[in-house]
Image (tube, grey):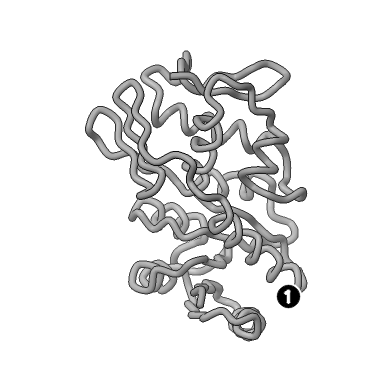
Amino acid sequence: MKKILIVDDDSVLRESLAAGLEAEGYSVSQARDGREGLGRASEWRPDLVVLDLVMPQLGGLDVCRKMREAGIESPIIILTGEKKEEIDKVLGLELGADDYMVKPFGMSELVARVHAVLRRGQLRPAALEDVTFSGVHLNFKKKTASKAGKVIHLTAKEFDLLELLISREGEVVTRETILNEVWDYDRFPTTRTIDTFIHNLRKKIEDDPANPVHLLTVPWSGYKFQK
C-alpha cells in the first residue's frame, strides 16, 4: 500500500483529500503545517507528498527545499492558489517538486496526478546504474551523486532528466521528448522549466557552468549529453 502525506493548514480540504485518497487504496497521513509536515516526512518516509504552498510557520517551498536537503526524495505535488504567480510554480519545481495543481481542483484530477507521478517511478526502470565522468559519480539505482568525492544533492526529477540524457549520449533530445518521458503528461506549464532544470544541473556537475562540456544546448532543438 503506497503511503501519501498531505500537508495543508486547511483542515476541511485536508480531510477531504485524505478521504478521497484512502478510497483509492492509499495509506494517508496528515500534517497541519509545514513544520509538522517536515517532521512527518522524515519519520514516515511517504511514497508521495501533497504539499500546500502557503502555510503558517513554514511555507511549502521551504518544506520542499528542506526535504530535498535532508535527502528525502519522495515525489511532491504542490498545491497552489489560483492567483499564484508563475514564478512560484517554477520555483517549486526547481526546488524539487514533481508536479503542481492550481486550486480549486476536483478529486478525480488529484487522483489522476497521484497515479501518474507514482506510475512514473514504477514504470521507468533504471537502464543505467553507475555512471562516472569528469570526477562525477552517479548511481541511479541508489539515487546518490558525488563530484570530486563530495556529495551532490540531486532531486528525483534531476536524476530522471540526467538518466534520460545520459542513456542517449551524443543524441539530441528535444524538449518535447523530455516532457513526455520525464514528466509524462501534456499539461506541464512550459518547456522553459526544462531550461531551469538544466541550468541547475550544470551548476551541480559542470566545472564551469557557463561553459558546459557535458550538458550541451543544441539551439532550436533541445539538449544532449557527452562525456
Label 1: which residue? 107
Q: In this picture, is 109 found above or below 150?
A: below
Q: At 70% from the left edge and 43% from the top edge, which residue is drawn? A: 180
Residue 104 point in image, percent of width and height:
76, 69
Q: Residue at x 48, y 67 (%)?
A: 47
39 lies left or right of 99:
left
Percent of width and height locating residue 89: 63, 49
Q: Quadrant of residue 175?
A: top right
57 or 72: which is nearer to us?
72
138 or 193: nearer the eye? 138
Q: Tell me where residue 140 appears, x and y as whole percent.
A: 41, 44
Q: Residue at x 63, y 22 (%)?
A: 172
Position of residue 226 in the picture relative to residue 52 (left or right): left
Amino acid type at mark 1: Met
Residue 56 location in percent, x, y? 50, 69
Q: Residues within 10 Å of mark 1 (few under 14, many from 20)?
A: some
Q: Quadrant of the C terminus?
A: top left
**Depth check: 131 or 23 in front?**
131
Image quadrant in which you'd find residue 17 = bottom right
Would residue 114 appear left or right of 105 to someone viewing this image?
left
Quarter-of-image position of residue 208: top left
Residue at 33%, 55% in the rendered image: 70
Q: Is residue 129 above or below residue 69?
A: above
User: How many marks can you see?
Assistant: 1
For residue 2, above or below residue 212: below
Identify the residue at the far left of this view. 149
Label 1 sits on a secondary structure element that is helix
